Image: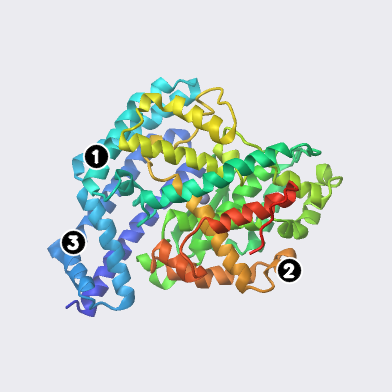
């Protein structure tokens, strides 16, 4: 039997770990936002030391077999419901961590740190061969990791599990096959229709005005500036230090207003999730996000379903025209909307539109899987990459810098990460369809710049649960169905059939 005192003591240990994690998050945020370049070397030592302490705290959770006793109580079903969630989730992390010998963890950390430098150099000089040796090493280590963790049907399962617990390779294969079957022909149809007046949305946008506009939008969406702030970094991200401090970063381009605005809305979506987690449970999995896919569903919904919709711009476009009369004063809302949503197959994932985005992910998923199961030799990766870009997107890759070397993920050892972007898109479409069904006035509210009911709905149905449910169970609970690619396919079909005058609108 676990006494209430014992559980309180366990919780206290989790909160102490949370404080350490919070300190680490502040340091990492500072590194990307403020730190002068010369500070990097000593800072890396500080972070490594704190990360080591955190790891020790984590393993110490099982001192005197405390964690095993809690797990036994969980198995015997003698814990209170909320406590059982805490134990289930901590045990899952602990089991994974405990399976990786320290020697392996150190080897991976060293390889990844070298690989990153090689990747930067390879990308700069457009020379894949500079990156190849460390990439091969990482793949070898990731295959070892899969063996150490254990898996059912596919070694890749063990890697995905770190980012999207419970999701199997087979689920992803089905999902990506459905998407590919839809997207490839749909894209072909769109490409045949591209002969329309093409309007450029670029111009000259003073940064100060952009900052103000970004802030205005973030505030209106519900981002609490008393519990967060927006800064600038090379790669936008969101981070949380505590329940009342969730920050985001963005980036600016003088020429392209949407370079900052899209990523601001995206990161606000992440931060709204964090700001909606129940503060009374802070430090425990009950106040933590479920998975990368669910996190991404929140950012994508605000960025795309809301931020790239006509309804959204009904409210914001007159304000945009007033703030930036050049070039918007002479562009109608209809033309602006079409220009904002132009579909154009391209080489770079992070600059792609809603239709082509997931084809970039399909490609990465298929390649990662083949690298991990050994059917693709890393030295043949560029060729395989280029062939898939030709087959799926119809584009020729002119060099490796804009091809296989474009993403940082593999140099970090993040295999199994990419699919969570697409899962996020699918969850977003399915959640949003459910919200539209339940919130009768949602469309007219968005037209008036009012998002409070939508945010309340997300808080109540998604954010408030922390990690109470798995991603699959949450989707089932909120939408009444298991995760499906259908809602996303319907969403794209309807939206882009209207924009491109295709006769394929689906009404469900
Ligand atoms: Zn994101």
Foreground label between 3 and 1: 1
Residue 232 at x, y = what percent?
Answer: 57, 45
Q: Earlier in the sequence, mark 3 or mark 1?
A: 3
Tag 2, which secondary structure?
helix
Label 3: which residue?
62
Q: Earlier in the sequence, mark 2 or mark 1?
A: 1
Residue 90 at x, y = what percent?
Answer: 28, 62
The disc at residue 433 is none
- The residue depicted at 44 percent of the width and 54 percent of the height is 292
Residue 475 appears left or right of 86: right
Residue 501 appears left or right of 57: right
Quadrant housing residue 18: bottom left
Residue 231 at x, y = what percent?
Answer: 57, 48
Residue 428 can be seen, yes or no: yes
The disc at residue 144 is 1
Label 2: which residue?
444
């Amino acid at each position: 039997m676990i006494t209430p005192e014992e559980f309180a003591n366990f919780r206290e240990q989790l909160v102490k770990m949370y404080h350490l994690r919070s300190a680490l998050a502040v340091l990492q945020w500072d590194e990307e936002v403020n730190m002068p370049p010369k500070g990097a070397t000593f800072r890396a030592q500080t972070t490594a030391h704190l990360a080591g302490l955190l790891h020790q705290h984590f393993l110490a959770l099982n001192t005197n077999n405390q964690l095993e006793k809690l797990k036994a109580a969980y198995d015997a079903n003698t814990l209170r419901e909320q406590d059982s969630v805490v134990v289930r989730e901590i045990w899952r992390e602990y089991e994974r961590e405990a399976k990786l010998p320290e020697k392996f963890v150190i080897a991976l950390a060293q390889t990844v740190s070298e690989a990153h430098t090689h990747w930067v150099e390879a990308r700069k000089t457009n020379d894949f061969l500079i990156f190849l040796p460390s990439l091969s090493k990482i793949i070898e280590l990731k295959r070892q990791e899969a063996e150490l963790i254990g898996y059912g049907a596919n070694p890749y399962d063990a890697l995905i599990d770190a980012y999207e617990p419970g999701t199997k390779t087979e689920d992803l294969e089905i999902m990506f096959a459905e998407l590919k079957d839809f997207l490839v022909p749909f894209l072909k149809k769109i490409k045949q229709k591209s002969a329309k007046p093409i309007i450029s949305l670029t111009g000259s946008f003073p940064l100060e005005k952009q900052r103000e506009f970004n802030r205005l939008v973030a505030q209106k969406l519900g981002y609490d500036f008393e519990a967060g702030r927006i800064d600038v970094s090379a790669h936008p991200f969101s981070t949380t230090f505590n329940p009342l401090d969730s920050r985001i970063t963005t980036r600016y381009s003088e020429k392209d207003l949407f370079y900052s605005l899209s990523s601001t809305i995206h990161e606000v979506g992440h931060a709204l999730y964090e700001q909606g987690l129940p503060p009374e449970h802070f430090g425990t999995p009950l106040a933590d996000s479920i998975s990368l896919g669910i996190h991404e569903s929140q950012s994508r919904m605000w960025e795309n379903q809301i931020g790239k919709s006509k309804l959204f711009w009904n409210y914001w476009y007159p304000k945009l025209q007033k703030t930036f009369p050049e070039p918007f004063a002479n562009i109608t809302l209809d033309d602006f909307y079409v220009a904002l949503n132009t579909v154009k197959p391209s080489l770079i994932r992070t600059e792609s539109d809603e239709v082509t985005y997931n084809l970039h992910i399909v490609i990465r998923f298929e390649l990662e899987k083949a690298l991990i199961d050994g059917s693709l030799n890393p030295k043949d990766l560029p060729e395989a990459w280029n062939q898939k870009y030709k087959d799926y997107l119809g584009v020729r890759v002119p060099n490796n810098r804009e091809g296989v070397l474009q993403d940082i993920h593999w140099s970090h050892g993040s295999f199994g990460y990419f699919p969570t972007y697409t899962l996020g898109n699918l969850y977003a479409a399915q959640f949003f369809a459910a919200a539209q069904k339940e919130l009768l006035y949602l469309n007219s509210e968005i037209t008036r710049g009012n998002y409070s009911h939508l945010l309340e709905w997300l808080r109540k149905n998604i954010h408030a649960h922390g990690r109470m449910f798995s991603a699959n169970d949450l989707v089932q609970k909120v939408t009444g169905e298991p995760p499906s690619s259908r809602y996303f396919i319907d969403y794209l079909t309807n939206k882009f059939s209207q924009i491109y005058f295709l006769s394929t609108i689906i009404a469900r």
